[in-house]
Amino acid sequence: MEDLREIVLDQARLGGACAVGIATVETLEGGPESTDIRQLLPGARSAISFAYTLDAGPIDLYLSKKDRAPHERNNIDVNNLVSGAALNLAGYIEMKGHKSVPVIANNYYRSDTPGGLLDMLPDISLRYLAVRSGVGCFGLSGNVIIPEHGATVILGATITTAEFEPTEPLPPEKNYCDGCCLCMASCASGTMDPDELTTVTMGGKAFEYSKRKSYLRCEYVCGGFTGLHPSGKWSTWSPGRFEIPEEDEAFGPALMNGLAKYGEWPDMGGGYYHSLSPHKMFITCGNCQLVCHPKKEERQRRFQLLKEAGVVVQNENGSVEAVPPEEAIQKMEAMDPQRRAMYEDIE
């Protein structure tokens, strides 16, 4: 079993993973329900957790609002690559005599919760597996950060009945998060609580990150239905300018309004299909992940790119462009009322 363990870890690295680790039923004990790997595979004993990096090249283009497409394409490709790597690893371990299943990297949700698929709860939390197995640490944002690569990674996992020896979490000194809060400053929705922390205990070890407010905040903004920062000075890649409420309770109606208008927008090119949306979706945010970098000066530089890139508006042909905030207002006011109402609430 020890030989198989080393081969499996090496197999993940050879496949392109930048970090790999193992969590077990015992090391995950006491964690949230989404850490119970036996839900996905009865009799499961271990989870091989791993991460693949996103390409750094398209990030500057994306944050500076020069080009959205390269990062979106890379993000989709890496998610597909990670899901395929999980399947490949599961197949290898299965052929060695141990039942194994892959975990889909993203956009797959449980249906047995009170709200069903609309709760958007994963069958297994890839973040928790990664942190407990030492693939990475929690940053203040709750994103998993890796000492050499930051938060710009996609996580994957394979669950198996094989009893592998677990790997240890990274020591605190490996966590570069210094509480700079640029992740929060990059989030137009205010999803992360600046004052309260969430503590998760797994296998007797405690892990902390900022408490999340309503997840509808992230669905509303990171989902692309709106994107104008409350300051009005910058936006995500979404041309939506609908108000971002202050109270959590207001996000349900806001999301429904945004979703209805979203379907009227012209196609901006690229995109992907999400099982919970009647419309094609586009990657327009993810800023908290993309800004986070092991070097503080690089974090600050990336945040400045985002903050100074302006505000996105959509042209009639579907193309989107970033312009200074004052020019964006002029462009919106020049639209006929019916078209303008597709992007912002007007009287």
Image (cartoon, rainbow, N blue to C red):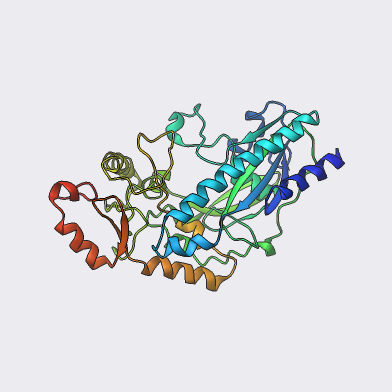
| Rendered location of residue 20, percent (x, y) | 71, 49
Q: Is residue 114 above or below residue 184?
A: above
Q: Is residue 288 above or below residue 248?
A: below
| Rendered location of residue 131, percent (x, y) | 65, 50
115 horizontally vs 203: left or right: left
In the displayed image of the protein, which residue is found farthest to the front? 317
282 horizontally vs 175: left or right: left
In front here: 136 or 91?
A: 91
- Counting the numbered discs, the total is 0
| Rendered location of residue 51, percent (x, y) | 64, 50
| Rendered location of residue 264, percent (x, y) | 26, 41
Quarter of image, res 253: top left
Whether residue 140 is visible to the viewer of this picture, yes or no, is yes
Q: Residue at x 31, y 66 (%)?
A: 233
In the displayed image of the protein, which residue is found farthest to the bottom? 297
Q: Residue at x 39, y 55 (%)?
A: 190
347 horizontally vs 107: left or right: left
Whether residue 230 is visible to the viewer of this picture, yes or no, is no
Q: Residue at x 56, y 64 (%)?
A: 293
Q: Is residue 179 above or below residue 102?
A: below
64 horizontally vs 245: left or right: right
In front here: 343 or 198?
A: 343
Quarter of image, res 146: bottom right
Rendered-image quadrant of the N terminus: top right
In front here: 229 or 343?
A: 343
